[in-house]
Amino acid sequence: MRKKLIFIVVSLHILCLLLNCKEKKVSLGSGIHFDKEENIHYGNDPDQIMDLYLPHENPSKKKTAFIIIHGGGWRSGNKSQLTFFTLSMMQKFPDYIFANINYRLASVNRYGIPNQMEDIRKVTVFLKNKLKYNPKIILLGNSAGGHLSMMYAYHFDPLKNVKSVINIVGPADLSDEGFKTYEDYSFVEKHLIDPKILSGSMTANSFSSPVQWITSNTPPTLSYYGKTDRVIPLSQKRILDSVLNKNNVINESYEFNGGHLDWDKKPNDSLLIKKIETFLKRTDT
């Protein structure tokens, strides 16, 4: 009876969040409480907003922060896609901070990178200023968000604030023949990278491939790929694993049953969260 009551309470809170209720606290049962701030602006652009969840207990204790980055082919999507998963993560990691972010989307008139890299950096600065300390950062993203998580951690984080990366069905090598069947590949080639930031003879595909920037100092990375994913083929997992291992980077990767959008469906979501828990203990993040 008690378990049933807890399930009902948690379900009501999740429903309330999804309906954009104005409650400033989130209670997830078992004494788990978060203070919630929705649609905080971390920059001047309308797209630069996030939902922030701060553990209610021990507010003065320094905590590690998850930055959650949605997918959508770099030019669509919204943080609301990951609200339910973020809440599930909060139940498992009640002592962590969670920032579920929107970012500036790419278009034919606006390149994705470096804008999206700058957005992630702005979130880290916002958190540092708000918390009055520099938290350890874990980047977690799915699809394009997984790619952005790796790109930022591997190449755009010179201060090494990112301590771990959770890459969910993210492309790691954009020059991989298996990825070139992606239906929006031509858009990615033309509008993901601002050619002004390319150096030497490096192509846009090479620059925007996280595997190109892996070194022995790359943060530990956990990856999750679908066995029947028609968007991000398993060749991406094999390429990423190979380069991480070659550089002696702590890494784990797993395959789930299903396609590109099935990673957060049962039982895949529960398996992922368990693997994340074990991985973070291993890496002391």
Image (cartoon, rainbow, N blue to C red):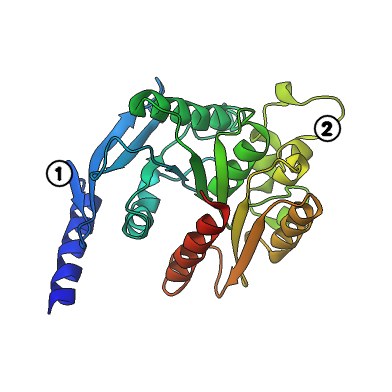
Tell me the residue at 37%/44% (across/down). Answer: 98
Q: Of all residues shown, which one is farthest toward the right?
A: 201
In the image, what residue occupies the spot 46% across and 67% down? Answer: 274
Mark 1 is surrounded, within 10 Å at the Cα level, by few (under 14), some (14 to 19) or many (20 or more) other residues, namely: few
The CA span between labels 1 and 2 is 49 Å
Q: Residue furthest bottom?
A: 1
C-beta proximity under 8 Å, tags 1 and 2: no
Closer to the observer: label 1 or label 2?
1
Viewer-proximal residue among 239 and 27: 27
What kind of residue is marked 1?
Glu
Q: Is residue 280 left or right of residue 155?
A: left
Res 224 label: none
Q: How many marks?
A: 2
Query: Quadrant of the rendered structure where residue 195 is?
Result: top right
Query: Picture quarter containing residue 46?
Result: top left
- Where, by quadrant of the figure, is residue 242 drawn? bottom right
Q: Is residue 210 left or right of residue 116?
A: right
**Residue 134 % position (x, y):** 45, 29
The answer to whether any part of residue 262 appears in the image is no
Q: Give me the disc on residue 23.
A: 1
Residue that label 2 marks:
202
**Is residue 177 placed above or below 37 in the rendered structure?**
below
Q: Position of residue 273 (x, y in %)?
A: 45, 63
Element type where label 1 sits in the image: loop
Residue 76 percent across, percent down from the top left:
48, 43
Q: Could you tell me the amino acid type at mark 2?
A: Met
Image location (x, y in percent) of residue 114:
61, 28
Pick whichever of labels 1 and 2 is earlier in the sequence: 1
Mark 2 falls on what kind of element?
loop
The 10 Å Cα crowd at callout 2, few under 14, some 14 to 19, many 20 or more, is: few
Asked if residue 246 shows in the view, the reply is yes
